[in-house]
Amino acid sequence: MAHENISQVIESSPFIQKHSALLRIWHWVTFLILSGSMITVLIISTMLNPRANIALVQNQLKGKGVAVSEEQAFAVSHEYEDKMWEVHKLLGFGLAFLLASRLLIELVQPREEKIRSRIKNAIILFKLNDKNKVEYRHYVYVKRMYLLFYLILLLMALTGLGLAFGRELGFPRQIHNLLKTVHSLFQYFMYAFVFLHLCGVIIAENSKIKGIVSGMINGN
């Protein structure tokens, strides 16, 4: 039986795999919410940066015959930043929910589609020494990247929830600042993963490993 399973794994490219409907839905919803979360950070750090908009607020009000100080203009521009952070917070709750739901999906996945099974198959492939050795090694690295993604997503979710509910939980300022630092740091790892993931898919679709995107849509 074990020999048959190994044969099924290596008879075609290991990158061509089936995905259940639940996993496909989870993947695309996660993609949309994660993209929205990153876009909100981009908007906050550019167009809605309070310091950068002080002069804009002053000039707009001056044109209406109202003069305000820098402190007053900052309060106005900061309010828009706060509103966008609220959107970011809601998207963060969505990501935390998706992470929890991913654990539940794993419990009901077919055995061959479980992460544990695919990692086991990846290890089996890594030990093989044939003409496809380079492709098998690449496959193992990809699986490790996915595990790293889940770990980063977990840390982002936990630190984000800590920032959202820290006041209610009585966290001191030092803990709040630590959570903010860790949350901000790991966002760059998330950006890097998304970039590498998209590049990898584009490269694969333009090589012999085709059908990854369509497979994540129709499951075949």
Image (cartoon, rainbow, N blue to C red):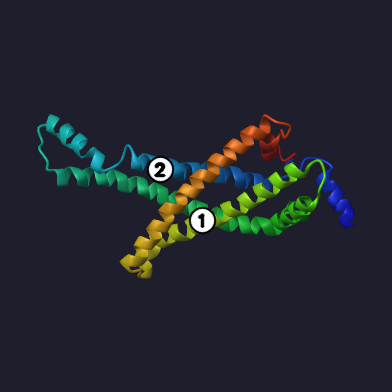
Count numbered badges in the picture.
2
- As drawn, the label of residue 40 is 2
Q: How crowded is mark 1: few (under 14 residues within 10 Å), some or many (20 or more)?
A: some
- As drawn, the label of residue 136 is none
Q: Which residue is drawn at 49% across and 44% down?
A: 191
Q: What residue type is labelled 2?
A: Thr
Q: Which residue is drawn at 39% across and 63% down?
A: 165
Quadrant assignment, res 216? top right
Query: Where is residue 64 shown, x and y percent of the image?
Result: 13, 31
Identify whether 43 is placed above or below 178: above
- Looking at the image, residue 50 sits to the left or right of residue 126; the answer is left
Q: Which residue is drawn at 62% across and 38% down?
A: 200
- Label 2 element class: helix
Q: Which amino acid does label 1 sit on?
A: Ala
Q: Which of marks 1 and 2 is nearer the N terminus?
A: 2
- Looking at the image, residue 213 sits to the left or right of residue 154; the answer is right
On the question of residue 12 being in view, the answer is yes
Q: Residues within 10 Å of mark 2 (few under 14, many from 20)?
A: many
Query: Where is residue 163 shown, x and y percent of the image?
Result: 39, 60
Query: Where is residue 77 shown, x and y percent of the image?
Result: 24, 42
- Label 1 element class: helix
Provide the residue designation for mark 1.
96
On the question of residue 17 being in view, the answer is no
User: What whole-number distance in Å separates the C-alpha atoms at marks 1 and 2?
Assistant: 17 Å
Quadrant assignment, res 209? top right
Query: Where is residue 15 shown, x and y percent of the image?
Result: 72, 42
Identify whether 86 is placed above or below 178: above
- Looking at the image, residue 150 sits to the left or right of residue 4; the answer is left
Image quarter where the C terminus lies is top right
